[in-house]
Every structure is written in structure tokens, then in C-alpha cells.
Image (cartoon, rainbow, N blue to C red):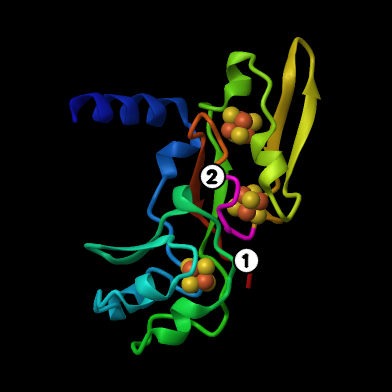
Amino acid sequence: MPAQASISRRQLLKGSPRAAEFSPRPPGVDLASMNACTRCGECVSACPEGILAIADCGVVLLPEQGECSFCGSCAEVCEEPVFATDLSMSHIFAISNDCLVQAGITCMSCRDACPEEAISMQPRIGGPFVPVLDQSACTGCGACVAPCPANAIHAVKKELPDA
Ligand code: SF4
Ligand code: SF4
Ligand code: SF4
């Protein structure tokens, strides 16, 4: 436990995206609507990908277990006003400094996994290509998370578009 705390503090000081890490939720669920979650678990049972779980705060998404297909089954079975009709995610993903490329190791696993082609590999002098995640193209599906051998990809809150 203390080791985890020191890691988080170091990352916070480095300004790594991990500093903004938080629990992602299924599509159509935001922080406000989570208040209506009774933690009944119906959505967890309905998810064909097995990527939902019940936490103290309500339903959460577990991208390390798989990709969300946006099938809508979780929203269909929920009897409470938790899911919006717009099944978009309230998070996107970011790549932290834990990426293997930062240690000079070539890796393109996240780029290859992304169905939206939101991750591109950009050349740099003196090292392997660097993955760059276009957050405007990221749907928050989480397909890039499990393939990352460095556990370097984490959810961050999606900023609301300008009104
Ligand atoms: S939309 Fe489908 S795949 Fe995604 S979390 Fe809900 S039930 Fe699971
Ligand atoms: S979360 Fe999905 S859309 Fe976003 S970068 Fe990862 S694989 Fe691509
Ligand atoms: S999969 Fe992970 S380690 Fe590999 S390039 Fe992407 S972020 Fe870096």
C-alpha cells in the first residue's frame, strides 16, 4: 500500500496522465447519473464482454478485461435513470510515460488494437516511433488497454465541448 502511494505521488509530480486516472463508466453514464445506480448488478450480467463491475460508487467499466462494443445491453436492462440515450463515453484514454517506447523499446500494440485508428506512431530522432493518441478520435472503447504490455493506457475524463 505505501509503495502504491509513493508511485502515485511521483507520477503526480511528473505530470503523467496517470495523475488524472479515474474509474471509467459504461457508455451513457456520467458522474451525475451514477447517483441513480442502485448497484443491482443487472448491467453486469447483461454485458456480453464481461467488462462491467459494481463498485462502491456504482457500475464501473473494466477496460483491462476487454473492449466495449457499444451494444447497449447494459442500458437496455437498467430500470433506473442511469443511462442516457446517447451511448457515448464520458471518458477517453491517454498514454502515460510508462509506455515502453519511453525506455527505448519498440512497441505498436495499442496502435494495432485501435478500431478507430486513433493512435499513430510518430518518428523521432534517436529512438523508436512514439504512439500519439488523438483524443478527438477516441471513443473510449478501451480496446487498446489490454494489449499494452506496460499498462500505460488509462482513462481520463472527457472535456465537455464548448457550448
Ligand atoms: S455497451 Fe455492451 S459491451 Fe459496452 S459495457 Fe454495455 S453491455 Fe458491455
Ligand atoms: S479507447 Fe478505443 S478508440 Fe480510444 S484509442 Fe483506445 S482503442 Fe482507440
Ligand atoms: S501498447 Fe503500451 S507500451 Fe506499446 S506503444 Fe502503446 S502505450 Fe506504449
Task: State the SS at label 1.
Answer: loop
Which residue is depicted at the point 53% across and 27% down?
A: 97
Amino acid beneath label 2: Val
Residue 104 drawn above or below residue 55 = above
Where are the magenta residues, as a range? 139-145
71 vs 157, nearest the viewer: 71
**Residue 62 at x, y percent in the picture:** 42, 55
94 vs 101, nearest the viewer: 101
User: Seen from this angle, which residue lies furthest bottom?
Assistant: 79
Amino acid beneath label 1: Pro
Instruction: Using residue 23 as the reference point, say whether residue 125 is left or right of it.
Output: right
**Residue 146 at x, y percent in the picture:** 52, 43
Q: Are marks 2 and 1 in contact (CB under 8 Å)?
A: no
**Residue 65 at x, y percent in the picture:** 45, 51
Q: Quadrant of the N terminus?
A: top left
Mark 2 lies within 8 Å of ligand 2 (Cβ measured)? yes
Q: Identify the main secondary structure in magenta.
A: loop
Which residue is depicted at the point 67% across and 26% down?
A: 107
Which residue is depicted at the point 57% across and 80% down?
A: 86
Which residue is depicted at the point 49% across and 38% down?
A: 17
